[in-house]
């Protein structure tokens, strides 16, 4: 399934942001930052990745509803994310 261009653009923007968060996490670990700071940033990166997955699934569900496609596979993907 191909996603609409606006969904791809949004997902790529979100993934670049997550990439920056991961680099920041690496820097925190390298610098010996406080455990609380690392876990807080790790949680933010995990949440951002979850939002990427849900954005993709949301787009796919909208497309399937329009196309009348079977949503069993999407349901399995949703459960993997949750």
Image: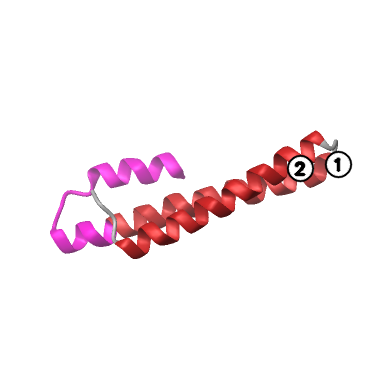
Q: Is residue 4 left or right of residue 48?
A: left
Q: Would you say residue 56 sits in the magenta stretch? A: no
Residue at figure coordinates x 41%, y 39% from the top left: 80
Secondary structure of residue under mark 1:
loop
Q: Are marks 1 and 2 in contact (CB under 8 Å)?
A: yes
Residue at figure coordinates x 29%, y 46% from the top left: 74
Q: Which residues are magenta?
A: 61-82
Q: Would you say residue 66 sits in the magenta stretch? A: yes
Query: By what rule are the colours in the image chosen?
Result: secondary structure
Q: Is residue 39 left or right of residue 50?
A: right
Which residue is labeled 1 in the image?
A: 34
Q: Quadrant of residue 36?
A: top right
Q: Cα distance, mark 1 to mark 2?
A: 7 Å
Looking at the image, is 69 positioned above or below residue 7? Answer: above
Q: Quadrant of residue 4?
A: bottom left
Q: Residue 18, percent across and down?
A: 58, 49
Q: Residue 76, percent across and down?
A: 32, 40
Secondary structure of residue under mark 2:
helix
Q: Residue 5, percent across and down?
A: 31, 62
Q: Which mark is residue 4?
A: none
Residue at figure coordinates x 41%, y 57% from the top left: 55
Judged by its main secondary structure, the magenta piece is helix
Count how many numbered circles sit on residues in the image: 2
Q: Residue 28, percent across and down?
A: 78, 41
The 10 Å Cα crowd at callout 2, few under 14, some 14 to 19, many 20 or more, is some
Looking at the image, is 23 positioned above or below residue 69? Answer: above
Residue at figure coordinates x 27%, y 62% from the top left: 62
The 10 Å Cα crowd at callout 1, few under 14, some 14 to 19, many 20 or more, is few
Which residue is labeled 2 in the image?
A: 38
Residue that sits furthest to the left in the current view: 68
**Looking at this view, is 25 or 57 the one in front?**
25
């Amino acid at each position: 399934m191909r996603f609409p261009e606006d969904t791809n653009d949004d997902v790529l923007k979100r993934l670049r942001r997550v990439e920056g968060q991961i680099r920041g996490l690496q820097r925190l670990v390298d610098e010996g930052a406080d455990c609380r700071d690392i876990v807080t940033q790790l949680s933010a990166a995990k949440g951002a990745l979850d939002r990427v997955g849900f954005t993709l699934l949301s787009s796919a569900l909208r497309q399937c509803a329009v196309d009348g496609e079977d949503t069993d596979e999407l349901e399995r993907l949703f459960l993997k994310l949750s």
